[in-house]
Amino acid sequence: MKKRRTEKLPNGNVEVTIPVCLKYNGARTVLVVKDGIGKPLIENDLSPLQKALIQGFQYRDKLESGQVKSVSDLSRSEKVERAFLFRSLSLVNLAPDLIEAILDGTESKNLTICALRKGIPEDWDEQRRIFG
């Protein structure tokens, strides 16, 4: 099992690894954060922000893996507007500590979907200043 980590890749991208696993508990599928960090995430109980973040990473993975060739292809396959995809994809550029706070459910009151729709600065320090 991998541990939480942040690594700068040779191409300039930053890879954030947050170990989770899906577990079926007899009634529903539960997303469990490992290493005793955070709380279990239950699929039906995810906040809209948690759902949006997870969705953003799923969309990014489909693009990076080559499952789809473009955002237009992804838009068609997911049956969503391109603008929605771009907003979802922008969430993967949040600072790692902000991502962890969202997954843990401990994000500040300033970090909302509505606030994120206004734009996400590229600089992580600026993100922390705005979203707290």
Image (tube, helix red, strand yellow):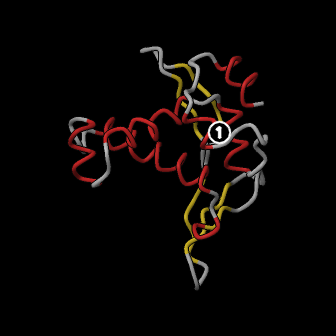
- Residue 59 % position (x, y): 38, 44
Q: Position of residue 117 (x, y in %)?
A: 54, 35
Q: Quadrant of residue 129?
A: top right
Vertical order, 46 against 84 (above or below) = below
Give the image location of residue 99, x and y in percent.
65, 39
For the point 63% across and 36% down, which residue is it?
115
Residue in view at x 20 percent, y 36 percent: 69
Q: Residue furthest bottom?
A: 26
In the image: residue 104, left or right of residue 91: right
Q: What amino acid is labelled 1 in the image?
A: Ile
Q: Is residue 11 left or right of residue 108?
A: left
Q: Quadrant of residue 87?
A: top left
Residue sitting at x 58%, y 84%: 27
Q: Secondary structure at mark 1?
A: helix
The correct choice, above or below, for 38 with respect to 30 in the image is above
Q: Counting other residues with Cα less than 10 Å from the Cα at mark 1, is it few (<14), some (14-19), or many (20 or more)?
A: many
Q: Looking at the image, which is closer to me, 55 or 5? A: 55
Question: Label 1 belongs to which residue?
Answer: 99
**Left or right side of 57 for 95:** right
Nearest the viewer among 26 and 43 is 43
Q: Quadrant of residue 84?
A: top left
Toward the viewer: 89 or 5? Answer: 89
> What is the number of callouts on the image?
1
Seen at 27% across and 37% down, the residue is: 71
